[in-house]
Amino acid sequence: MVKPVLCYSLITTGWGQVVAVWSDVGLWELGFPRPDQAAAFTDIHAKDIAELASGHEACLWSDQLTHELKLYLQGYPVTFSVPVDWRVYSPFQTAVLRYTADIPYGATVSYLEVAQAVGSPKAARAVGGAMHSNRTPIIVPCHRVVGADGSLTGFGGGLDMKKALLLLESQKE
């Protein structure tokens, strides 16, 4: 695969600064809300930040994501509509993450349930690995995937962030 041209946008929310990285296809990567711009960039794996351009035409979905992300972080049930760039994921990872993207706001499912849903009922641990590869958390809501007993396990943004996002979603009217 040819390395895509990436650009970024910085989104200011009530929860902090979020970096969104865009390709020509859609959202490539999304950070977690952090207190400032420098901290926001620490989440980004596209480490060729020098190659990222702010304002490149591929960022055309930035306003849409900004609007949706701000609403979400204010507690509104949002179905994110920006396209996600699924390139670089394996077929299994793609299946898991696409399934996860469709978990409804406020709902949780177990790793085992995800494994069963994607046709690999013995692959709950592999589902965890696919979640770990998720470059677009919140948009692909891996925080909605929990242990079989409902326990909060592994999350790139930390368990406090996972708990906060689930609490936010439980406040729905």
Image: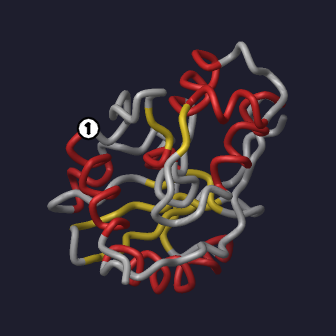
| Image height of 22 relative to 9, above or below | above
Q: Which residue is drawn at 57% across and 84% down?
A: 64
Quarter of the image where the N terminus is located: top right
Neighbor class of circle 1 (other Cα within 10 Å; few <14, some 14-19, many 20+) is some
| Image height of 171 relative to 43, above or below | below
Q: Name the residue under label 1.
A: 159
Residue situated in front as seen by the camera: 117 or 51: 117
Q: Position of residue 154 (x, y in %)?
A: 37, 28
Q: Residue at x 34, y 54 (%)?
A: 32
Q: Position of residue 167 (x, y in %)?
A: 27, 60
Q: Which amino acid does label 1 sit on?
A: Leu
Quarter of the image where the C terminus is located: bottom left
Residue 127 sits in which quadrant? top right
Residue situated in front as seen by the camera: 90 or 46: 90
| Image height of 11 relative to 127, above or below | below
Q: Position of residue 83 (x, y in %)?
A: 71, 67
Q: Position of residue 113 (x, y in %)?
A: 65, 34
Q: Which residue is drawn at 61% across and 56% down?
A: 103
Q: What sort of colour scheme is used for the picture?
A: secondary structure
Residue 18 sits in which quadrant? bottom left
